[in-house]
Image (cartoon, helix red, strand yellow):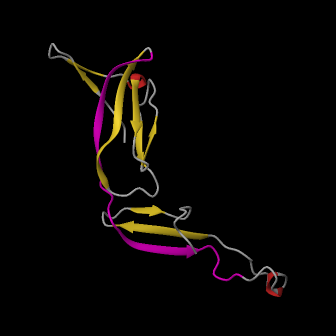
Amino acid sequence: AGVYAWAHYSDGTSAKVPAAQLQVLSSLVGISVTAGSASAPPKIVVAVGASAKCGEFVSAEWQVCGVTVATDDVYVNLDLPPATSISASVAVSRVTSPTNAARVTPVSLPTSTTVSVQVGFETGATADFSGDSRVTI
């Protein structure tokens, strides 16, 4: 999600803080932050393995010429939907041991295959967990 900030001045006016001047930091392992630029805001991303939490885990600093002008804590609600399904599929249906004769001609069975794992969530969304370190086969 993109992070945007507005400065509210004592005279009652406000202005959007330029993305390149906005420094965003996370104090929670489950949230990673990418820096903003002149054309894109800083982004916070829920990291793999994060768990549902809410609180002020992100801080935003307005920096002009390397000097912090203002800072504030950002309330974040990591509302992660529960998983409702999991499915696994393999690229080939039969494999053999690397030492088995079936690996060579005329049978030529592969000695390995790729396993793809998809997780379904309560919201209807799905996610590819094939490369997730929590998946063991």
Quarter of the image for the C terminus: give it: bottom right
Q: Which of these two is toward me, 45 or 125? A: 45
- Residue 98 rendering spot, x and y as whole percentages: 79, 79
Q: Is residue 74 left or right of residue 65?
A: left
Quarter of the image for the N terminus: give it: top left
Q: Which of these two is toward me, 40 or 24? A: 24
The residue under the point 40% across, 22% down is: 21
- Residue 57 rendering spot, x and y as whole percentages: 34, 43
Occupied quadrant, residue 4: top left
Q: Which of these two is toward me, 2 or 63? A: 63
Magenta segment includes 75: yes
Q: Which residues are magenta?
A: 66-95
The residue under the point 44% across, 61% down is: 127
For this orientation, the residue located farthest to the left is 12
Q: Is residue 134 left or right of residue 72?
A: right
Occupied quadrant, residue 59: top left
Tell me if residue 40 comes above or below residue 136 in the rendering.
above
The residue under the point 56% across, 72% down is: 136
Magenta segment includes 134: no
Q: Report the number of discs.
A: 0
Question: What secondary structure predominates along the stretch shown in magenta?
Answer: strand
Q: Is residue 97 left or right of residue 78?
A: right
- Residue 29 rendering spot, x and y as whole percentages: 44, 48
Q: Is residue 48 left or right of residue 75?
A: right
Occupied quadrant, residue 32: top left
